[in-house]
Image: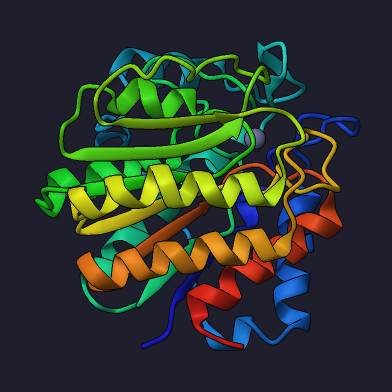
Amino acid sequence: MLPAYITHSDCIKHDMGHQHPESPDRLGAINDMLLIKGLLDCMLSYEAPLATEAQLMQAHSALYIHTLAGMAPTEGHVQVDPDTSMNPGTWNAALRAAGAAVLATDLVIAGRASAAFCNVRPPGHHAEYAAAGGFCFFNNVAVGMRHALNAHCLQRVALIDFDVHHGNGSEDIFCEDERVLMCSIFEDKLYPFSGNAPRGPNMVNVPLPSRSGGEAFRAAVTNKWLPALEAFQPQLIFISAGFDGHREDDMGNLGLVEADYAWVTQRIVEVAQRHAGGRIVSCLEGGYVLSPLARSVAAHLKVLIDVD
Ligand SMILES: [Zn+2]
């Protein structure tokens, strides 16, 4: 069985301006790299559907969804927070990004894909239950996870977040949900300046100092994440796959390289094989310098595809 690759051209139509790091070019850079490396031939491609309001409401308040819908412009830009704005393409892009996570969940649970990667934007892990922020509108992984828990009736779902920034939105949504274990590693004293004090016992938050490097990252995975994951025995693992901790990405300073992303993916695959029937749903989050982003996603997917 092959893994699924889910994307949509609508995700390129969300654009926050020429100078904005969360650029539409990110998706094409990833797609081109996967094509060149032959990795797209090893995956089943799907178009992301639009998430429904009922699916979004599993992770967001109705008031927030309606407020955001009402802000969507027909021309120009509307600022949502100092770093985040909507253009006429944003609303559908955000629905496709969340819908991708729902489709990915359906595919892996139905046994139609061994794992799934969602090459989508806008990203999601800074989107809270009732607030956008940090380039995010809907929390894509959270929508997928609640779909797994509520529509498919899974009892234990894990979220792994290795983006350089703390996933404050995911913590906000899941901090009181005992069906979820969230494991994150992020750079300390970086946006959104949260995560040092976990908001629930189901949060394994590991802040690492700037310039920690791959060795400290791997030690944190081994010593903090893996014991918690083994004890939790997740039935499905979601990944907030942010690659802005790469040493060539100026958004953060963790100093990771492709081999670190491949290594952590391999550890996640091993946990998934032991407890979750190998089921993994990975959604793109950060990663802003195109070349290291594309190379890191390729390294991540080579492991998910099990290609040497
Ligand atoms: Zn990030």
Quadrant assignment, res 190? top right
Residue at point 29% right, 73% down? 273
The reply to whether residue 17 is in sight is: yes
Q: How many marks?
A: 0
Coloring basis for residues: rainbow
Of the pair 8 and 206, the residue shown nearer to us: 206
Residue at point 47% right, 59% down? 48
Residue at point 30% right, 49% down? 227
The reply to whether residue 50 is in sight is: no
Quadrant assignment, res 71? top right
Which image quarter has ligand 1? top right
Q: In x, y percent, where is residue 282?
A: 47, 57
Is the N terminus in the top left, top right, bottom left or bottom right quadrant? bottom left
Q: In x, y percent, where is residue 277?
A: 23, 73
Is the C terminus in the top left, top right, bottom left or bottom right quadrant? bottom right
Residue at point 21% right, 65% down? 275
Of the pair 267 and 278, the residue shown nearer to us: 267
Q: Is residue 102 above or below residue 76?
A: below
Of the pair 197 and 239, the residue shown nearer to us: 197
- Relative placement, left or right, of 81 versus 283 is right
Quadrant assignment, res 17? top right
Q: Is residue 71 above or below residue 26?
A: above
Q: In x, y percent, where is residue 108?
A: 29, 69
Q: Is residue 257 above or below residue 128?
A: below
Toward the right, the furthest residue is 19
Q: In x, y percent, where is residue 236?
A: 26, 58
- Relative placement, left or right, of 247 versus 212 is right
- Relative placement, left or right, of 161 versus 33 is left
